[in-house]
Amino acid sequence: MAHGAGNNTDNQHQGSKSGSFKCRLLGSGTTDSLSSAAQGIDVYAMADYIKIPETEEKVTLETAANLKQGRGKGTQAWKSAYEDVNGALLETEADTQNESAALDARSDIKEVIKKLLLPKDTTDSSHIEEKINEIFGSKEEEKLKQLENAIDDTIIPAGVAQSDNGQRLGNINVEDKLAEILSYYQLRKNKTLVDLKKKLSNTTKITEPKSTEEKEKVCNSKGKDNEDECEKLAKYGCVFNPKGDEGKKCTLSEEAKQKAAGKQTKKQERKMPKQTLQPAILLSFIKPLFCLHFLL
């Protein structure tokens, strides 16, 4: 509201209690409200967008052109708001324009890989190039398109994200729905890893072979330097050596030692099974690569 103590150009938010310009619409008092007499001036509302005439006429609205250019009575706030919003839209449009270049020359891809996949203090750009090759297979622009097509053609089964029917991923444009799908596959992948770890742990406990040293101790202790007792342990790889040291004449055969050593090596080399990265699960990495770039 544009009003003041005695001058309608003061542009005060609250009118005076006295004087000729007593516009009390923003006042909380119970007295001195608008009188029944004409105010003698036009009254403006909403940062001068609405003009309330002093005469018995309809209100008028400032034109969009005047608001955008700051013309008219006190419309600078509208001009500033327009410029801020318009500038943000132009900036977003520029950010989302497609780039045509080798992938290692794409600033958007490099920036996202750096933020999402590399240690915080990494400065060596060669690590970014390594990740690009790891993800896309090469730096060629066409590789990105191939991967995008493969992801878009992935069919999301019915039941995922409360969907009644199977849907092509590329046809889903609702962000909330994509977020639900992403969460589903992330949770399923994590559960699969946990289940595999438990299964591997249980299998290892059941099949874990004894070491060569442990088997040797069994031969020594149960064979008791007695040839007959040692022969009873032949199925465990024990053989009797009359020239052996005291307490170690019943010993593990060389063949049994080699077998035990081989099993121990395999145990140490055992790793988690390598998972196949299904196209749908690629969503958990590739989509953030292009979507989260604008949020980071």
Image (spheres, rainbow, N blue to C red):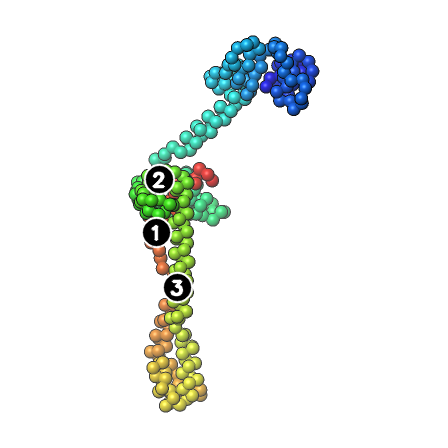
Label 2: element kind: loop
Residue type pointed to by label 1: Leu
Task: Provide the residue designation for mark 2.
Answer: 172
Asked if marks 1 and 2 touch (Cβ < 8 Å), the reply is no
Q: Nearer the viewer, mark 3 or mark 2?
A: 2
The Cα–Cα distance between marks 1 and 3, rounded to whole angstroms, is 20 Å
Dot 1 lies on which element? loop
- Residue 79 is left or right of residue 288, and the answer is right
Mark 3 falls on what kind of element? helix
| Closer-to-camera residue (218/207) | 207
Please give the name of the residue rendered at 41% of the width and 43% of the height, measured from the top-left corner.
Answer: 179
Residue positioned 40% across, 66% down in the render:
202
Comparing 17 with 275, the one in front is 17
Q: Earlier in the sequence, mark 1 or mark 3?
A: 3
Q: How crowded is mark 2: few (under 14 residues within 10 Å), some or many (20 or more)?
A: few
Tell me if mark 1 has few (under 14), some (14-19) or many (20+) residues whose alpha carbon lies within 10 angstroms of its own: few
The reply to whether residue 154 is in sight is no
Type of the residue with mark 3: Leu
The answer to whether the residues at label 3 and label 2 have Cβ atoms under 8 Å apart is: no
- Residue position marked by numbered label 3 in the rendering: 200
- For image coordinates 40% across by 74% down, the residue present is 210
Quadrant housing residue 20 = top right
Marks 1, 2: nearer the viewer: 2
Residue 266 placement (x, y as % from top left):
36, 68
Establish if 72 lies above or below 276.
above
Closest to the observer, 184 or 19: 19
User: x, y (%) of residue 164?
Assistant: 33, 44
Instruction: Give whichever of discs 1 and 2 has the lower sequence position.
Output: 2
Q: Tell me the CA gap for discs 3 and 2.
A: 37 Å
* Circle 2: residue type: Ile
**Residue 268 quadrant:** bottom left
- Using the image, tell me which numbered label, if any, was put on residue 277: 1
